[in-house]
Each structure stands twice: as C-alpha cells, then as structure tokens.
Amino acid sequence: TLVDKGNFRHFMAKEIHEQPEVLGHTLSRYLDLTQSKTVLPKGAEFDFASCERLVISACGTAYYAGLIGKYWFETIARLPVDIDIASEFRYREVPVKAGDLALFVSQSGETADTLASLRYCKAQGMKIGAVVNVPESTIAREADFVFPTIAGREIGVASTKAFVCQLAVLASLAVHAGRVRGTISDEREAELVRMLAEIPAYAVKALRHEVEVEQLAQPLSKSQHVLYLGRGTSFPLAMEGALKLKEISYIHAEGYAAGELKHGPIALIDETMPVVIVAPYDGVFEKTVSNMQEVAARGGRIILITDQRGAEESGLQAWKTIVLPDVPAFIAPIVHAIPVQLLAYHTAVFMGTDVDQPRNLAKSVTVE
Ligand code: G6P
C-alpha cells in the first residue's frame, strides 16, 4: 500500500504525530478494559509463570525499548532479564535455559543480527517471542509467540512510532507477567491497566509541546556535542534521544546514566555543552536533580524534560525546561519519548539534513 506524508513535511513528523493513534491500536490488543486486565494476543499465550528468566535481544532503537522493558519486567513481575544488543548476543555463546523465553524486539522483523540471535536461542531450546511490527516478517514467522505492535508502516529511517508501540507492548507484557507470577494483585493490575489505557491521551498532551521544543532547535544546532542524562527508565530513553539526534542531525550525542556522570562525562561539561536531562517525577527524581546541580555548577546548559511536579520540586532554574503534564512514573518513558523525538526532529530540520533518509543509514539492516 502507498503511504504518503499527508500535510507533513517529513514521514518522521507524520509518524511522530500518529503516535496517540497507533498506541491506541497497539494497546487495544493487550488490554481488556471491561475487565481491567491485560490479555495476550491470540496464539501468543506464553505462560510467564513457567519461566525463570527472560532474554531480550535487539538492535538500535528496538534495543532501547527492550532495555526499558527490563526495568518493567524486573520491578513488576520480578522476572530477571538478560538483555544485549543482538550483534554481541549472537556470538557471546550465552548460556540459556531451555523453556525460558527469549524476546526479540524489531520493527522490520528482518534485522540480520536479531534474527541470528533468535536462531541461536531456538537451537538452545528456548521459547521464542517476537515484539514485531511487520507480521509477515522472518522474525515473526520464526517466533513461537508473536506480540505485534500495531504502528503501521514506518518509513522514516529513525524509528519513532514503532518504538513507543514496542514500549506499550513490553509494559503490558510485564503487567501480565506480574499477575500470572503472583507478584502483583488483581487490584494492582487493574491500576496499571488504567495507566496504560491513558497513554494515548498523554501522548496527545505531549505533542502540544512541539512549538516549545522547536525553539530549542536553533541553539542546539550550534553545538558540536550534546549529552543526554537519565536514571531508571529514563536512562535508556536518554540513550535513545542521543541516538535520534546523532542519526538525523549528525551532531555527536551521547546518552549516559545520570549516576555515571562523575565517572567520566562531567569532564566535558562547560558553557558550550548542552545537557538534555530526562527526569519525570519518579522514584529516582531527587537523585537526578543532584546530578543536574553538578552540571549547573559547571556552567552546563541544561535542557530539562520533566513534568509539573518535577518542575516544582527541582528547585533549579534550567536553561530551558519542557514541562509535560504529570504522568504516572510507570508510563512516563512512553510519554517523555515524544519531546525527545521532537527535539531531534526539529534540530535536524533546522539544520537541513535529509531527515527521512539520513546519510549512511538504512531502515532495515538485513546484512551483517
Ligand atoms: C536500523 C534502523 C533503526 C532500527 C534498527 C533496528 O538501524 O535505522 O531505526 O531501530 O535498525 O531495526 P529493527 O527493524 O530490527 O527494529
């Protein structure tokens, strides 16, 4: 089928704006709102109580989705997760347990390294799950359990809507796993399901900050380097933000765990260094704020992405602050992904790069 850009300048912009809708489509496959329960898609009824450990492998943006998933599976379902980029995993001769679940996250379902990792796990007797956007892809076909993302065709090389849908699936699976493993009660499940169901509405609200984010593009475009910091689920999101920026604007960017600041990147901080701090008001917010103070004390130009509560509690004037509505910490990474994507997008547009087809990159890496 033919997909066009509609009124958008780039596919990436269109895909960013489609997120509320495709998140809704995706979540509808995993949530039963009449029962306030999570459900597994037909044919994907994996018994999460039967497994002791989860293995996740993926590449690029899909890998960062998996990394956020690890936090959810571990905290909600108390299920230990081993996660690695597929190009390392496939050659690492990872000892795995037959019967445990290996989960592969992929938009295209054709990434060579991810597929090779899948085949390794299959040969080891693991059960294979795939969080995948293309149902007829090789990865979907070779999986025992297909957990679809309903993002629709994604054309921009830099993944956006597929990423948030991957997160929505992983969050739903973690809640489901928590219930069947008995680590959360039915009431807690219902609470988490209500939060998940609110994601599309929060995504709409996050998109309303576009003009504000766009105003950061011009100053950011003058930078040689940008550092992204986050803790907890915001740490993988910081890495994803840095990846997006470098992919489409060609500005060097690094994502770092805020707590590692002292162990290296703090040496880079001066007045010329923009530092994007992703900090929703969550359980590690105070810790991130103290890292933010360390950056501020060295003159770093802080772009803080937070929520109302966070803006009030931070007690610090950042160079620029994007204040999203308050959102439950559980789903914050999905909502906060939106300003992070918009920041990369508008910086690239401002710089005049080929946003949908950045140099040297391919949408799907089917060769090693
Ligand atoms: C390429 C794309 C990325 C994507 C990655 C993994 O690098 O440019 O956007 O995240 O491959 O692709 P997959 O299709 O497996 O999600």
Image (cartoon, rainbow, N blue to C red):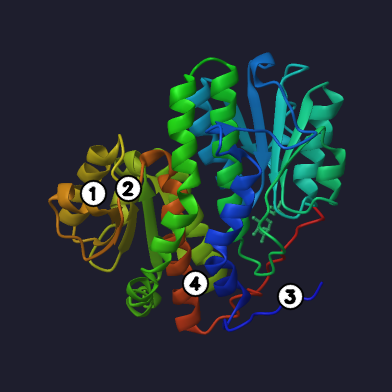
Quadrant for ligand 1 reads bottom right
Q: How far apart are the two marked residues, 1 and 3, measured between alpha carbons? A: 39 Å
In the depicted view, which residue is nearer to us: 82 or 337? 337
For marks 2 and 1, the one nearer the N-term is 2
Q: Is residue 33 visible?
A: yes
Residue at 47% over, 50% down: 199
Q: How far apart are the two marked residues, 4 and 3, measured between alpha carbons? A: 20 Å
For disc 2, the marked residue is 280
Q: How far apart are the two marked residues, 1 and 4, measured between alpha carbons? A: 25 Å
The reply to whether callout 2 and callout 1 are in contact (CB within 8 Å) is: yes
- The three-letter code of the residue at mark 3 reads Val
Label for residue 345?
4
Dot 4: few (<14), some (14–19), or many (≥20) neighbours within 10 Å? many
Instruction: Tell which tag, 2 or 3, sits nearer the viewer.
Output: 3
Q: Is mark 2 within 8 Å of ligand 1?
A: no
Label for residue 310?
1
The reply to whether callout 4 and callout 2 are in contact (CB within 8 Å) is: no
Image coordinates for residue 50, horizontal then vertical, percent: 69, 14
Instruction: Tell which tag, 1 or 4, sits nearer the viewer.
Output: 1
Image coordinates for residue 278, horizontal then vertical, percent: 35, 52
Left or right of 51 on screen, residue 112:
right
The reply to whether callout 1 and callout 3 are in contact (CB within 8 Å) is: no
Residue at far left of view: 315
Q: Is mark 4 within 8 Å of ligand 1?
A: no
- The three-letter code of the residue at mark 2 reads Pro
Q: How far apart are the two marked residues, 4 and 2, measured between alpha carbons? A: 21 Å
Q: Is mark 3 within 8 Å of ligand 1?
A: no
The local secondary structure at tag 3 comes to: loop
For marks 4 and 2, the one nearer the N-term is 2
Residue 224 vs 81, above or below: the answer is below
For disc 3, the marked residue is 3
